[in-house]
Each structure stands twice: as C-alpha cells, then as structure tokens.
Image (spheres, rainbow, N blue to C red):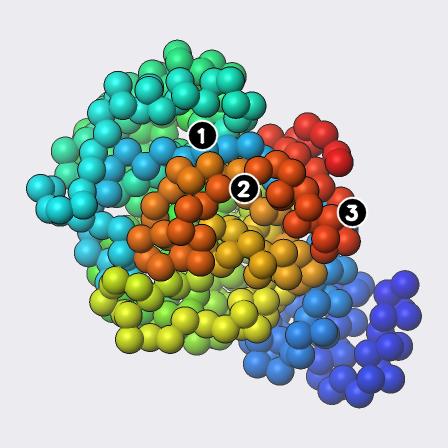
Amino acid sequence: MNGSLLSLMQITGIAPKLLQVAEKVLSNERITLDDGNMLFREGTLPFLSLLAETVSRRVSNNHVFFNRNFHIEPTNICVNHCAFCSYRRRKGEDGCWEYGIEDVKEIVSSYKNKGATEVHIVGGVHPDRDVYYYADMLKAVKDCFPTIHVKAFTAVEIDSMCRQAGLSIEDGLQLLKDSGLGSMPGGGAEIFDEQIRQKICPDKTGSNEWLRIHKIAHHLSIPTNATMLYGLIENYRHRIEHLERLRILQDETKGFNAFIPLKFKHYNNSFSHIKETTTIEDLRNYAVSRIFLDNIPHLKAYWPMIGKQVAQLSLNFGVDDLDGTIDDSTKIYSMAGSDEQKPSASTDELIAMIKGAGKIPAERDTIYNIIRIF
C-alpha cells in the first residue's frame, strides 16, 4: 500500500524533495525540522492528508476517540497578563468569578448520573490559592464522585500554586496525585520560542519550566497532554521547533497522551487586529503536526474552539480524537469568539460526525482505554 501511494504521488507530479519526505513517512522513518518546515510551506492539502492519515492509521486503526466529560473552571481571576487572552479578569472586575470548593462539589454532583467519566479542571492563576487549596478541592471532587477521572491544572497553574505554598514541583505534584489528580491537560505551552513569549505572555511560566513540569509529572506516572497556540505572530519555523521540543521530551518519558493544536481566536483581546487563520491553514497545521509528532499517540481537534464542521474535516488530516461532550461547561474560547458559543455535543452527535468522515467512533476513558466501539 505504501509503495502504491508513493507511485501515485510520483505520477501526480509531486516535487522530488517532497517525495523524499513522503518516502520517510511511508517507511515510518522520522522526519527532520527542515522536512517539517518544507511540509508547512510546500505541501498541498491532498498530499498532507495522505501522509497524515498514514501516520494516524498506524496508531488508531481508523478509530476516532471521544469521551464523556465536563469542565470546571474554578476562576478566571489571573495574575498573568497574556496579550492573547480574552478570559482573564482582575479580582473585583466585572465578569470575574471564583468558585469555592462547595461550588465545585455542587457542579460535580450534578454530573453523577449523566455517564461522565472525566472532569477537566483548569482556570486562571489565582493570586491567593496555593497547592494545598487545590489538593482539598481534588479530595472534595473524589469524595463526591469517586469514579470520576480528574484531569486538572496546567503546568502554569501548578508552577504558581506550588510556589505560593513553598513546595517543590515534585512535592506539589505528589500531593495533588495523592489527593485525586489522575492526569494533566496541556495548556499554557503557547509557543515555546521565548522571544515570542515576551510579546504575547511575558509573565507566564517559561517554556523550559513548562517542559520540566511535564517531565516531572511523567516521572510520577501522571500522564499529560501537550498543546501549541498557533496563528498569532509565530512562523512555521517556530511551530516546528515547538513540536521538536515536545518530540524530544516524549522520546525520554513517553508521558504525553495527545497533542492539541489551539487556534488563536482574536475577539476581545490585545491582538484583535490579527486575522485568524483560515480553515486551510488549520487543516495544514493538523496534518503536519501528525506527521512530525511520530511518538505522541493521539492528535486532538478541540471542537469547541474550531467548530464542529472544521473538526469533522480534520478527521481526514490525521486527527483521531474529538475530545468529549463538554456540556456547555467551558468559557475559555467562547469568551474569545469561538465558533461554538454554547459548546455541547451529545454522544450521538459525536458518533455521527465521526461516521460522516468515514471513521469508526470509539468512546474512551481519559487514558485511551476503549470503553465501547460504535
């Protein structure tokens, strides 16, 4: 089959240098930074789709995964000043919120009989809540709903909450794990290039520390995801270098479950003058990410951010995960002008999206054990 694909590419006039990259991918050989940059700049969408789908099928065998989840965002009060953020509020500012532990318990209780298997907890970096506070929150969640998997806290949140408590990252993560933390999301990575970070998120946890925190989590047997913010002021080289640093860490730890490209949304923030990426660029980014990240098992399209139609299209560009049902429980992207202002999807709707793309729907738990195939 791979030989047939390569022959087809030769017949259709693909440039020799792109054919060399295709031969690597079809032979399951790792591509280089320069290869990835060339795919971004010169690869056509049909070409990228063929290669990305080849990589995806090796891992997922034409399955596309989803889970039954809901989000809790304990607060949007944040000490950081990210220029791309439409979510952050200062303490006391209109539109801010801060849920207490009892509020969180009430939200969790409302999902006990809805079939949810995961709660996703992320929010702003609150100035007055340390790791002990969040450990108590996790204990309350698990007391209320013992079987729920808790995926919680970005590396940026963990950095701050541990520093506030005077604990090392190792001790803080162990405390959170002992309190019920099952895995971590991948937020806060943004783009790893430090010159760009100085322009878009100058006071946020740096790229080296983000990677170090995830490395520590992996060594503590806490699986995590990884992300990349794209479509702001970075170029293709910045994106590929970001992916390379994730690939290097994954070689060492094998701790990343999934990679999630996050599209910049320009409503109501300091970069509102920047035009958002096109659907073509979104699909290109998914495909090259899938091709380059040969050691991270899954590629997720976060549909509340890009909309369900584009998410369905992405299933033919290497994506094998649609996240979950969400149930209108997140505001991070709706406040930034997301295509899905009330992000909620039924299981039947996700199944229909997946089947409509010619894929096999598979409900999973957080760490990709298959619960059922449809």
Proximity of marks 1 and 2: CB atoms separated by less than 8 Å: no
Disc 1 and disc 3: Cα gap in Å?
A: 27 Å
Disc 1 and disc 2: Cα gap in Å?
A: 15 Å
Residue 218 visible from this viewpoint: no
Look at mark 2 in the image and give the residue it sits on. Answer: 345
Residue 359 visible from this viewpoint: yes
Look at mark 1 in the image and give the residue it sits on. Answer: 119
Q: Of the numbered discs in the image, which one, if any, rests on residue 61?
A: 3
Q: On the rendered structure, is 230 left or right of 10?
A: left
Give the camera-side residue of 247 and 307. Answer: 307
Q: Position of residue 74 (x, y in %)?
A: 28, 33
Q: Quadrant of residue 67?
A: top right
Q: Quadrant of the C terminus?
A: top right
Q: Amino acid at mark 2?
A: Ala
Give the camera-side residue of 320 and 176. Answer: 320
Earlier-in-chain disc, 2 versus 3: 3
Q: Quadrant of the N terminus?
A: bottom right
Give the camera-side residue of 57 and 66. Answer: 66
